[in-house]
Amino acid sequence: MGDQLARGEEYEKQAEKKLTSWGLFGSSSKYESAADLFEKAANSFKHAKAWDKAGSTYLKLANCHLKLESKHEAAQSYVEAAHAYKKTTTKEAISCLQEAVNLFCDIGRFSMAARYYKEIAELYESEQNIEQAIDYYEKAADLFQTEEVSTSANQCKQKVAQFAAQIEQYQKSIDIYEEIARQSLTNNLLKYGVKGHLLNAGICQLCKGDVVAITNALERYQEMDPTFSGTREYRLLSDIASSIDEEDVTKFTDVVKEFDSMTPLDSWKTTLLLRVKEKLKAKELEEDDLT
């Protein structure tokens, strides 16, 4: 480890020296030589697990590539810097990935840009910064869509829908899940997932608490996919809508429990259904107080 650190520092020193030297063959050769040395230094720092040193050295390497007008190489260096900084500081990692994205967009590498927008979103997600995660998943989805990488675009959109519902932006989630369900109906490989997307959209409808809107949505979903009305997902949504209409908490609990015993609900669905149950309980108590 110590050897690698010392080697990295030596390479870095040599690179800095190259940059301050006067080149007989113009400035490009000194930047090329410095870039080569900075790369060796960064690799040594990585080997030594000196992540901050590796990150800052990759930034110097990126700068050399920019001087040489090699935007692709500069972008890759920013990505390497980000991956080193990820080990120590998320903020720096995000900043480097943003620089990489800007360069990839400049040279028309939109699928690469989308990939790193998604990585920024994941970093914000790991920091529990939901609003920023939504923003960057949306940016990634747009670029994946531009490049017709539909699977990745839909993965990002589903993340947006998931987080939007968490912060009670239910209509945004509904629109996304319904759109993905519609798209999936035209693809034989994705058809099997339609009932899941419609269930997610339906649960978000339930969270809004408007029984008429829920009933209308279920009718639309049947029109969209005539097989949906024969599924357990449809029956769950329909029975919950009835329990809300009847203000019957016990019925709601039984319906959810029965579904969960056959198809375990994930934490996202459970969280949202608990919100629905709390609203229903509050309504029931209100009714009891009035009588």
Image (cartoon, grey):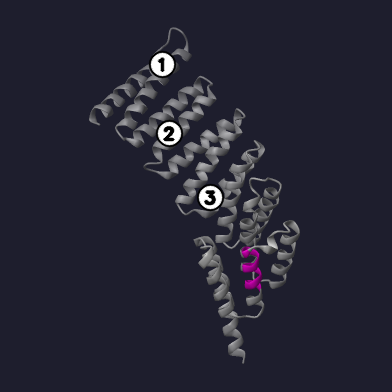
Amino acid type for the residue under numbered disc 1 = Ser
Report, in whole angstroms, how far the alpha carbon at label 3 lies from the one at label 1: 39 Å
- The secondary structure that dominates the magenta segment is helix
Report, in whole angstroms, how far the alpha carbon at label 2 lies from the one at label 1: 19 Å
Q: Which element is circle 3 on?
A: helix
Q: Position of residue 263 (x, y in %)?
A: 53, 62
Q: Position of residue 275 (x, y in %)?
A: 55, 70
Amino acid type for the residue under numbered disc 3 = Ala
> Where the C terminus falls, by quadrant?
bottom right
Q: Which residue is mark 2?
A: 81
Which residue is drawn at the image coordinates 50% and 21% (left, top)?
A: 67
In the image as oriented, which residue stretches furthest toward the top?
A: 24
Q: Which residue is mark 1?
A: 33
Q: Which element is circle 2 on?
A: helix
Near mark 3 (Cα within 10 A), the count class, few <14, some 14-19 or many ≥20, is many
Amino acid type for the residue under numbered disc 2 = Ala
Q: Which residue is mark 3?
A: 133
Near mark 1 (Cα within 10 A), the count class, few <14, some 14-19 or many ≥20, is some
Mark 3 or 2, nearer chain start:
2
Residue segment shown in magenta:
232-241
Report, in whole angstroms, how far the alpha carbon at label 3 lies from the one at label 2: 21 Å
Q: Nearer the viewer, residue 281 or 3?
A: 281
Q: Are marks 3 and 2 in contact (CB under 8 Å)?
A: no
